[in-house]
Image (spheres, rainbow, N blue to C red):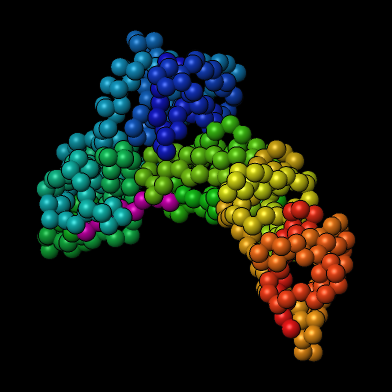
Amino acid sequence: MELYFNKIKAEKGYLCNSVAVECSVKGSCLRADCSFKPGIRNFIIVEIINIINPSTFKNHNRHNQTFLTKNLLTRFNMKIVFTFLLFFSAIMFSAAQVVPWKYNSTSISHRIYIGDANITIDNVPFKSGDAIGVFYDSLGYIACGGYAIWPATQIIAYGNDSGGNPNGFSSAGLGEPFYLKLWDKQRNCVVDSGTIVQFQALQPLFPDSAYFQPNGSSKLTRVNGVNKKVSYAKTNYCATDADPLPVIVGTIPDLLFLSQPGLALNATTGQINIAASTPGTYTVYFNTSLCLVFNSMRITIKMTLENLNVNVAKSTCTEKGQVTMDAATIVCGTAPYQFRLHNLLNGQETINNTGLFADVDDAVYELYVKDANNEEQKWSRTIKVEKECKDLIIAPNGPSGQASTYFIPYEGKAKIYDRYGSLKKEMSIPGDWDATDNTGNLVAMGQYIIICNENQQIVVTVIK
């Protein structure tokens, strides 16, 4: 398709068959085919700046374009190519922001004064261009009996004057109750009135001002519209989790769910089949004519390292540090795992498949874990290996309880120097140094540096 679409959170593409197809090149999305299935509600959502409700799209054959509403049912498998012209789409989107209600003007009416009313949506004041309407039951269908665009002084509610096929409010008995709806122009969606609706009677003859009466009048003092809410209990899932269903607050009769390829999503119920989904991060779109608190939610199916247990052993005077990962605490991953330590000081990396890193230098590290599905995650914390080296003291003629020798644990050769760099002794190791030099005499008190195999260094203090 030859149109670049911007979606929420900088995503790009369009939706078809409850699946999003992405456009990869800005300015020109390649032609894409949508396969339609019998009995499935097929539609697309095009988003330039705001989400546009699919029900606002019409067929425009004159411009060689096809816009399908969300209620279109197809009887055959077919492929339809959608081609959109950018200039025409811009015109169409700007014209789509109109009040979605229609009503019949009849010979019977009831005035509802709203000029001083406190009208809000989720306690946010009504804005210019928003609309408020009154609705009645027309043989099981909620129909509009009149509306006004804000700011306004009154709503004219029209009564039924057509007999058995109602075209307005019934005046039988106490009269039919007013059911209010609000329309948010900026978001182009409908808001239910909620439970906060307050009327004031203006005529003693009609004390219950929330009901329709021919030639009656009422005053609306307060109404707060309530946005519906759709969400999932959490944003991160793995193969061991139960298939999540959305949490829906309120009744949303026309709600549909859409997402990108790879997420096994039921378009009607919103249930996600975790086992059938490909690991990754997806946006689930909540499509309805009603206003929602959130129009979408990010869902991630992947390995997570948030519960990973990592143990760090400090280096000592004689040994380097050690880092150990417990693979059993990895959630959602598939064993076996590959562990990678990245040294932030020198950029060197160490990789193994056991999760046990020995002889680790003193430094700060990043940890990466890759599972059998080649999915790699970075641990959210860094690993710091520090040295803990207490003074080593030997006292060949010292008090009881003080070591008289020092055991050198490495294999090979050791050279022992005083602090001035003078070589005092050479010896094979492992073995004990008893504070003597090459002649067998005790060395003087002070610090001595033991160099093992030309690379390991140990500092020992001799006292007497």
Residue name at image x 54 percent, y 55 percent: 233
Q: Give the percent coordinates (x, y) of residue 349.
A: 67, 44
Nearest to the observer: residue 363 or residue 135: 363
237 sits left or right of 187 in the view = right
How many labels were placed on the picture?
A: 0
The answer to if 276 sits in the magenta stretch is no
Q: Give the percent coordinates (x, y) of residue 191.
A: 33, 47
435 sits left or right of 269 in the view = right
Q: Which residues are magenta?
A: 222-229
Quarter of the rendering occupied by the N terminus = top left
Is residue 309 in sight in this rendering? no
Nearest to the observer: residue 256 or residue 463: 463
Residue name at image x 83 percent, y 75 percent: 441
Nearest to the observer: residue 372 or residue 426: 426
Indicate the quadrant where residue 93 lies.
top left
User: Would you say the magenta stretch is mainly helix, strand or loop?
Assistant: strand
Q: Give the percent coordinates (x, y) of residue 25.
A: 46, 20
